[in-house]
Image (tube, rainbow, N blue to C red):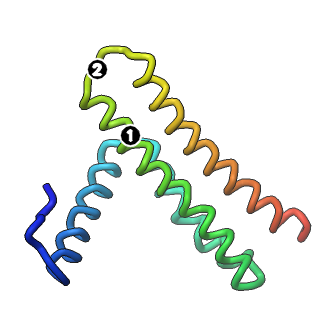
Amino acid sequence: MANNNAKGWSRVIHAFGYSMKGLKACFELEEAFRQEVFLLIPLVPLALWLGETPVERAILVGSLLMVPIVELLNSAIEANVDRVGLERHELSGRAKDIASAAVFSSIAFCLVNWGLILIPKL
C-alpha cells in the first residue's frame, strides 16, 4: 500500500521498494515474464556487440527492454481484471486480449528493429 505521508527521498525509497516487490511478484507468478527476462541475458550483450554505433546499440537494447516492460503492464491488467471477478465477461476478455496484443506488438517492434539494423549488414 502506498505511503501517502512519505516526502522527498523517503517517498523515492518507498516507491523503489514497491517497484522491486512488483518485479519479484511478476517474475515469480508470470511464466512469460520469466522467459522474456531469461532471453534478455544473452540478447542484451549480443545487441551491444552487433550494434556498430551508439544509436544502433540503443535501438537494439531498447527494443528488447520494451518487451518485458509491456509484459509488466499486461500482467498488471490481467491481475486487476481477475481481482474484479473470475466469471467470464466480454469486457474482461477484451481487456486481457488488448493487453496481450500490446505484448505481441512490442515483440513485433523488437523484431522489426533488429531486422532493419542487422539484415543490411548481411
Q: In which quarter of the image is residue 24?
A: bottom left
Task: Say what secondary structure mark 2 lies in.
Answer: loop
- Residue appearing at x 45%, y 31% in the figure: 96
Residue nearest the observer in this picture, 95 or 54: 95
Residue nearest the observer in this picture, 8 or 22: 8
**Quadrant (top left, top right, bottom left, bottom right) of the C terminus:** bottom right
Circle on res. 86: 2
Q: Between disc 2 and disc 1, whose residue precedes?
A: 1
Image position of 17 with respect to 97: above or below: below
Q: Quadrant of residue 74?
A: top left
How crowded pointer 1 is (Cα within 10 Å; few <14, some 14-19, many 20+) is rated as: some
Task: Say what secondary structure mark 1 lies in.
Answer: helix
On the image, numbered disc 1 is attached to which residue?
Answer: 77
**Residue 73 percent coordinates (x, y):** 42, 49
- Residue appearing at x 61%, y 42% in the figure: 104
- Residue appearing at x 68%, y 71% in the figure: 59
Determine whether, in the image, residue 102 is placed left or right of residue 26. right
**Residue 40 percent coordinates (x, y):** 53, 62
- Residue appearing at x 23%, y 76% in the figure: 12
Determine whether, in the image, residue 74 is placed left or right of residue 44. left
How crowded pointer 2 is (Cα within 10 Å; few <14, some 14-19, many 20+) is rated as: few
Circle 1: residue type: Ile
